[in-house]
Image (cartoon, grey):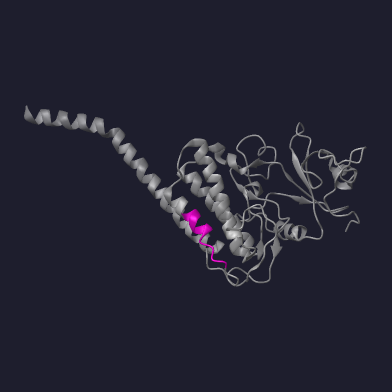
Amino acid sequence: MSSDPNPPWYVTSPDGSFDPGGIPDRLLHHPELQERGMVPTSPINPGVVFTTWPLTRPIYVIKVLNTEREELAIYKRLRSDMKRSNNHTIPFELTRTGHPLLIMPYIDRILWIYQGKWSPRNTMDFILQFVEGVDYLHSLHIVHMDICRLNVMFGPEHGTAPLHQDVVKNRLYIIDFDSSKQFTLGPGVQPAIILPETQTDKPNGLELLEPYSWDVYCTGRTLEDIINYQIERSNEMPPWIATKYIQWLIGNERGCTGVCRCRPTARTALRAIKLLVHVVYVMEGCRWVARTVLSLWPSWAWFGSKSAARKTV
């Protein structure tokens, strides 16, 4: 393990002031980055997260890991199962020498998944991917703790994805395990804990919540946030069944200090969304049949009138 201090690795200007755009020398001279020819140039989160030069493709994100937190151990566990379809961890590498760094593809924010085209099928597929990813983490007794719109990415159809061969187009990826925790007890057994600082507001201002249930709550709030953005952007309403499902995830928080019963577990939510996806597919299929029949109706009517005329003659 490196003797370098943990992040943030801030850079100061010659006058001693904080330089938000600075790249720390210890990162520029990191042995594995030099070996790979990677040069961090732009801070995303000063002192912690950086990107490589945007004009040199592909673009990578480099994160300086805090060895006092569980993120490094969690990524090591997730790395062993990257080929599982329900593992929605973004493809990544961990450095082996010097201070541990996380290297991952620079891909797009989740708002542009499906190129902004949110059909009922796309909406349900998106929800399914999200819940599937959370359930996978929970099956390993890993709780993300800070699920929000900024920590969910996707593989774009054009641009970045073809350059990062491990990135799958329109696949949802969960990132940033900086606040994440591993528990001995699983969902439905783990009691409440004091929550860390999070980007999602806590329900009713509560600080003590069951962590797995907190992840499900944040998943619901994030889905609500993203779909509301799409409504404002396109004026298209999501399927009513999706809206009801999201509210079910958010639940009605009652401040349980033991095992939380205010919302479903991720596993129960996953079983439900798989069923609802099929329901929406059937509904879409019925609409297609109806549209096809209606589009043919004038020709049927014309044929019927001709037949009646012949019989009359």
Q: Position of residue 184 (x, y in %)?
A: 68, 71
User: Is 249 one of the magenta-colored residues?
Assistant: yes
Depth check, front residue: 70 or 32: 70
Residue 181, by quadrant, is bottom right
Task: Pick out the residue farthest to the front.
Answer: 205
Q: Quadrant of the C terminus?
A: top left
User: Is 99 one of the magenta-colored residues?
Assistant: no
Q: Quadrant of the N terminus?
A: bottom right
User: What residue is at 82 percent from the left and 50 percent from the top?
Assistant: 8
Left or right, 4 with respect to 292, comes to right
Q: Which residues are magenta?
A: 245-255
User: What residue is at 73 percent from the left and 55 percent from the top?
Assistant: 178
* 243 up-or-down from 40: above or below: below
Q: Position of residue 265 (x, y in %)?
A: 55, 64
User: What residue is at 88 percent from the left and 54 percent from the top?
Assistant: 5
* 79 up-or-down from 166: above or below: below
